[in-house]
Image (tube, helix red, strand yellow):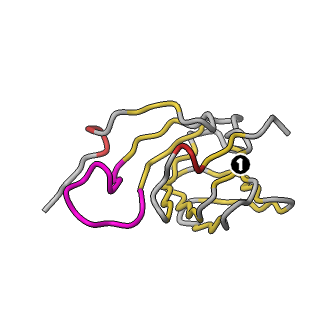
Amino acid sequence: MLLKKLCDCPHITAGDGSLLREILHPAKQPFDIHYSLAWAAIEPNEKSFPHKLEYSEVYYILKGQGKMHINNEETSVNKDDTVYVPPHATQFLHNVGTVDLEFLCIVDPPWQSVAERILSEE
C-alpha cells in the first residue's frame, strides 16, 4: 500500500507558471501505473501560460472558479468539474475567482518535460 499526503509532496513552479505538487509518477513509484497525477494551484487573477502537451490531460477542479481555454474554446470551470484536454491542444487556465484555483492534473501517458511546449503569452 502506498499512502501519500499532499503536504509531503514538494511544491515547484511548473513550466506553465502554476504551483505544482507531483503526487504519483511511474518513474518514482514502485508499482506499475501508466499515468501521472499532480495537484496544482493558480492564485486569484492569475493564469497558467499557454502550453501544449503531446499527451491527453484531465483536470479535476477541487476549489475555486476559472476559465479553461482549449484551442479556440473557453468555458467556465468550478469545483467538481472535470475537463478533458486532447493531445496537442493549446491550453491554459485563468483563475477568475477570489481564492486559489486548485485542481488535479492526470496525464496519460505520464508527463515528461520533452512532451510539453510552453507557448508565448497570448
| Picture coordinates of residue 8, whole percent (x, y) | 26, 38
In the rendered image, the vertical position of residue 57 relative to residue 11, given as above or below: below
Q: Main secondary structure of the magenta part?
A: loop
Closest to the observer: 88 or 6? Answer: 88
Is 120 part of what is drawn in magenta?
no
The quadrant in which the C terminus is found is: top right
Q: Determine the residue positioned at 62% across, 47% down.
A: 116
Q: Quadrant of the N terminus?
A: bottom left
Residue at 56 percent across and 45 percent down: it is: 114
Query: Mark 1 — residue?
Result: 92
The quarter holding residue 58 reads: bottom right
Helix, strand or loop at mark 1: strand
Q: Position of residue 66 (x, y in %)?
A: 68, 51
Q: Who's the residue at 45% across and 58% down the image?
A: 110
Q: Amino acid at mark 1?
A: Phe
Crowding near the residue tagged with mark 1, few <14, some 14–19, many ≥20 C-alpha atoms within 10 Å: some
Q: Nearer the viewer, residue 76 or 30?
A: 30
Does the magenta-highlighted stretch encompass residue 33? yes
Q: Magenta residues, as a range?
A: 23-36
Q: Reply above or below: 9 against 109.
A: above
Measured along the vertical axis of the image, is residue 14 above or below residue 33?
A: above
Q: Is residue 24 left or right of residue 64?
A: left
Residue 116 located left or right of residue 107: right
Q: Tell me residue 28's x, y (percent).
A: 28, 48
Q: State left or right for residue 88 relative to residue 80.
A: right
